[in-house]
Every structure is written in C-alpha cells, then in structure tokens.
Image (cartoon, rainbow, N blue to C red):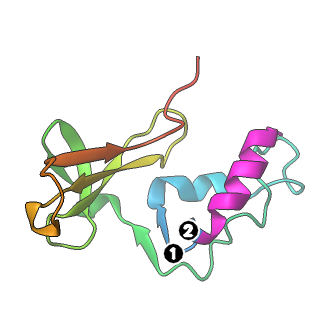
Amino acid sequence: MSVSHIAIGTMLAPICKEHLPCDAQSLFKSGYPEDPTSHFMSDLFPLEGHRKFLNPTDWTPIGPFPRALDFFGDGSLYIVDSPGHLVGHVKILAHTSSDSGVIYLGWIYLGGDSAHH
C-alpha cells in the first residue's frame, strides 16, 4: 500500500465525502485490509452517506475538455474529468470575475497529482 495514498487520502476525506465521481466508486468498494492489494483503506471513503455522486451523464464539453460538470449551474466553477493517475480523478476550472475587485484573469485551472512517470 502506498503511504502517499494513505496520508493524502486521509487529509482529503472530509472534502470528498460530499461529492465523489461515479468512476471512482470502484476504487473504494473493497479497500485494505479486506483487500490486501488495495491502495486505499476500506474506511477512507465510505460509499454510504454521500450526498451526490457526479453522474457521467451530466457532464458536457467546455473548451478543450470533453467532460465537465457545471457545479453550481452558473458557469462559475466546473469539475473537469481528468483520469490519468486514477479513474475518477478530477480538476477544477474556475471562472474569475472583474466584479470581485481583483484583476480579471479569465479562467484558473486547478489540479494536482495528475500523472506519474
């Protein structure tokens, strides 16, 4: 089992309990110790109790990204499907606004741990 997945996954668990991509469900069905080959603890992301699974049928293209979900429904924040490191991996595409009193930047793309070599 990867130590980085235990440490980082434990820190992100409170954030991810609300929303989990449907593609990622298979990763957490049978975790360690039930499955000794799993990279995740079995109680890291309990599947029951999630308020919303990000359904692949709700995703639409935006710009160069073939699958994105308009999170608030107002075009301000998109969850972008970006599998590569793992299925269900997502990034955030945020639209900035000049109304906030800061310099207008357009879009900010937030992501991490996207690829390993």
SS at badge 1: loop
In this picture, which residue range is highlighted in magenta?
Answer: 1-14
Please tell me which residue lies in front, 79 or 60: 79
The quarter of the image holding the N terminus is top right
Question: In the figure, residue 16 lies in which quadrant?
Answer: bottom right
> What is the crowding at mark 2: few (fewer than 14 residues within 10 Å), some, or many (at least 20)?
few
Q: Is residue 77 visible?
A: yes
Contact flag, marks 2 and 1 (Cβ < 8 Å) = yes
* Residue carrying label 1: 18
- The residue at 88%/45% (across/down) is 36
Amino acid found under the numbered disc labelled 2? Ile
Expressed as whole percent of the image width and height from the top left, the position of residue 75 reads 14, 64
Amino acid found under the numbered disc labelled 1? Glu
Left or right of 30 in this view: 28: left
> What is the crowding at mark 1: few (fewer than 14 residues within 10 Å), some, or many (at least 20)?
few
- The residue at 45%/59% (across/down) is 21
* Residue carrying label 2: 15
Left or right of 116 in this view: 59: left
SS at badge 2: helix
Q: Is residue 59 visible?
A: no
Left or right of 88 in this view: 2: right
